[in-house]
Amino acid sequence: MGNSILKYFKGDRVIWVVLMFLSLLSLLIVYSATGALAYRVHGGNTMYYLVRQVVFIGMGLGVILLMVNVIPVKFYSVAANYLLYLSILLLIVAVVLKFAGVIKGTGRTFNLGILSFQPAEVAKISLILFTAKVLSKKHETNIDLYFSFKKIMIFAGMVCGLILLSNFSTSALIFATIISMMFVGRIPIKYMLAVFAAGLLLLVAIYFLADFVPDSVGRIHTIQGRIERFIHGDPSSQQGVTQADYAKLAIYSGGIFGKGPGQSDVSNYMAAAYNDFIFAIIVEEYGLIFGAVVIFLYLIFFFRGIIIVRRSTRTFPAFVVIGLSLVLVFQAMINIGVSTGVLPVTGQPLPWISLGGTSLLFTSIAFGCILSVSHQNQVDKEIQQQPIQVNAPDEDQEMQK
C-alpha cells in the first residue's frame, strides 16, 4: 500500500522531503500566528485559518502530483509564449481597472468572488518559462546572444514595468531572477551591467521625483517612503510601533531556543505576522537554531535544484529549474531579510510557509515544474541505461549463407 502511493511522488525525493517539512512547519506557525486575526475577523474561531491552510497545502500537493504524473515537460515550452501573452493582458487589465476605480487597494489582486489571485503570480512563472525557452535556443554568434537578450528584455521590461505600478518588490524579484538566468545563459556581462545601471537610475529617479508624481500613479510614493525609512529610519520606530520593530522584538525574545510552540506574544500585535513577518514568529517560538534550520531547508532545495540542472540533458528544462529555483530562494531570502531588518519592508511571503491561498497554488506550480524536470531526467537516464538488443539472424538466413 505504501509503495503504491509513493510511486506517484516522482522526481527528486529530497525536495519532496523538504516540502513535507515546510508543510508541517507552515501548519504549526500559521495556527499560532493567526490567533489575533481569527478573533478580529472570525469571532475567535482559531481553527478557521488552520483548516484553510490545510486545504490549500493539500491542493498545492495535488497540483504538484498532477504535474509530475500527467503533464510532460515539453508542454511548458509549447505553452510559454501563450502564458506570457495572457499574463501581460491580465496585468494591463489590472492597471486599467485600478485607474478606473474598479479595483480597490493596491490593485495587485483580481477578486472574482470565490477566487482571487494576483496577475503578477501568473507573470512570474510565465516570464521565467519564456526566458528559459529563448535562452535554450542555439546561439552560434554574439549577434544571436544580442537578439536573445533584446527579446528577453523587451518582455521583461513590459512585465516588470506593469507590476512596478502596484508591487515594487515583486517586480524587482522577477527582474533579478531574469538577469540571473541570462548570466547563467552566457549573455555578455556588458549587457547586464547596462541593465543594472538603468535599474539603479530608475530607483534614484523614483526616490527624487516621486514628489512630482500624482498620488494616483501607482505606488511610487510608497516606494519612496520605504527607501526613506530604510536609509534614515522610521520616525514611528521611536515609539516602537512599526512592523519591523515588532519583528525584531520577536527575534530577540525568542533567543536561542524559543518560547515554545504557540507561545508567541508579538504575533498578537503584528498585522502581517502570518505572512510577511512569519519568519520572526518562527524564531520567537522555536528559537534561532530552528530559524537556521528553516534557512538550511531552502538551501537544500536550491542545492538539489543545481543537481537537477546538472543532470538535465536538454537546455530548456535546465533553464526552467534555474529560474524557478532562484525565484523561490530569492523570495525566501527577502522575507527573512525583512524580518531580521537587513532589507527594507516589502510584501513577500515565505514560500510554502506563509498563510496563502492562490499564491500558494502558484508556488506549487513552480515546485511541480522543477519536480517534473527531475522525473524526466530519471526517465532519460533509465532509457540510456537500457541495453541495446540485437536480433539474431533467422536460421533460414544462416543456411542460405
Image: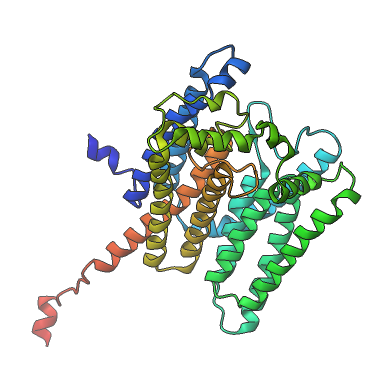
Residue at the top extreme of this rendering = 43
Residue 207, position in %: x, y? 80, 54
The colour scheme used here is rainbow
345, above or below 137, in the image: above
Residue 283, picture quadrant: top left
Residue 36, picture quadrant: top right
Residue 57, position in %: x, y? 46, 34
175, above or below 336, in the image: below
| Residue at the (12%, 85%) spot, across then down | 400
| Residue at the (62%, 17%) spot, across then down | 40
Residue 310, position in %: x, y? 39, 67
Q: Tell me the quadrant of the picture where the C terminus can be found.
A: bottom left
| Residue at the (60%, 32%) spot, across then down | 272
Q: Nearer the viewer, residue 188 or 215?
A: 215
Q: Tell me the quadrant of the picture where the N terminus can be found.
A: top left
Residue at the bottom extreme of this rendering = 401
Residue 202 is left or right of residue 340, and the answer is: right
Residue at the front extreme of this rendering = 238
Residue 115 is left or right of residue 203, and the answer is: left
Q: Nearer the viewer, residue 142 or 197?
A: 197
Residue 105, picture quadrant: top right
